[in-house]
Amino acid sequence: MHEDFVGQFLILVLLYFISISVVSTGWHVTPRFRVPMTPFIAIISARGWMFIIQRVKVLRSNAMKKILCAIVILFLCLTTSWAAASQWESQGNSYFLTKNTRESFSAAGAGGNKFLGKYLTYDGVSFLVKGADDWQDYGRLNLGSNKMFRVPLRSGMKVDEIHFLASGNYGNSYEHDALLHLYGETIIMGF
Amino acid sequence: MSIIFIQIILNILTAIVVFKSVPWADRETGLLSAAIVLLDLPMTIYSTVILTESLHVLFLSFFLYAFVKYINNRRLGWLVGAAVFLAISVYIRPVGCFLGLAMAGFVLYLWGIKKALTGIGHALVVFVLVYSFMGIWQYHNLKVNGEFTFSNIDCATIRPNGIIGRYARETDPYLRAMPPVLYYVHSVGRNFLNLMTAPGNMKLFHSKGLKIFG
């Protein structure tokens, strides 16, 4: 009986955090908001896994074990494939785009439903950097071919603003999705 | 670096508290729970960035431990402890500001109709303790800023981004074309999936190997 109440308590707290995160922050919700739920998720999850393991032990069926292993592997692959790795590498004083396909650069929709590369096509992106003195035009990133892109920011340079001037055919069904992501050494920006 | 080290220690403490909180009497479930806490990507990622998350989740795990103890033995002392830990966690991050209300309701449910009077008494203890502690800061805000509010986070997130009145504020033509019910189902569904399924950003590990893995 106590265990039932504990389970209900864990689910109540979990639902509370989910509701308050979605209701209060909407499109700005991030995995960071999942951190407070982690202890509660961990116990529910562990209980579920132990239940499955006990069932498998009872069944002692090789076929069942194989199916479960396949599900676990598939789940892990899906989870890891979601991880948003950096597309920019810093080399010396410059940032390089590590993936050299146009799609990986332009497909930058935020959130779970990204529609990779389907509605964002750029001819190019020009970028202007405002430093201590004045604006400086760093030219145009050529996205037309599979090239590495270089953003030459000098070491120690104080950057106040960076403006990206995108041209080409781009349409974004969701205004909340970023059109372009810039990955720096310590910053991630969505435009 | 030392702050990040402390945050990692706090995460390990959280895992230990979660291990101790598991109500079911098998050691394996406790160990697996602790392992999930330690290996959880957002927990790990955000402990490497200077944020309040690690401290917040530690106090929430103390709250979890005390409340589970209360469910098992129904002693008021554990309930008082749970309420205090919850109030402290709200001071760290205000996301749990309505959780005191939910917990008071749960305490009523826990005691049921047969022992309704005890339930009301214990629920009042949770409610009064949590909101008295929060009230101190709210009173401070009233005196200093003239605003009777615990946190002004609503100005930053809830009012501009929150779900209340979002359809009216929506400017995206694609989303505006949807009827309100469908709009809310669609947008809340996407927000929920983003919250619960995105693993976090591997970049914050500052590791080339993990970047490639990600």
Image (cartoon, grey):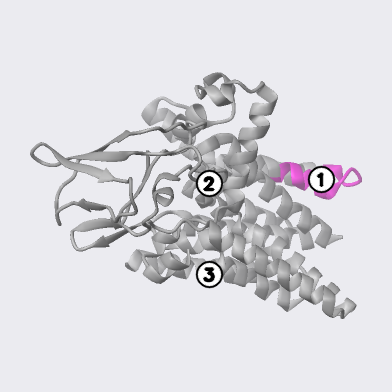
* Crowding near the residue tagged with mark 3, few <14, some 14–19, many ≥20 C-alpha atoms within 10 Å: some
* Left-right relation of A101 to A24: left
Residue A79, compared with residue B24, is above or below; it is above
Where does residue A134 sit, x and y in percent of width and height? Answer: 10, 36
Front position in the image: B20 or B194:
B194
Front position in the image: A84 or B119:
A84
Helix, strand or loop for disc 1: helix
The residue sitting at 32% across, 33% down in the picture is A167
Q: Which mark is residue B109?
A: 1
Q: Which mark is residue B13?
A: 3
Q: Which residues are magenta?
A: B103-118
Residue A140, compared with residue B173, is above or below; it is below
Q: CA distance from mark 3 to mark 1?
A: 31 Å
Q: Which chain does the residue under circle 3 lie in? A: B
The quadrant of the image that shows the N terminus of chain B is bottom left
Residue B179, compared with residue A110, is above or below; it is above
Q: Residue furthest front?
A: A145
Front position in the image: B88 or A188:
A188
The residue sitting at 25% across, 39% down in the picture is A126
* Crowding near the residue tagged with mark 2, few <14, some 14–19, many ≥20 C-alpha atoms within 10 Å: many
The residue sitting at 83% across, 76% down in the picture is A63
Task: Name the main secondary structure of what is drawn in magenta.
Answer: helix
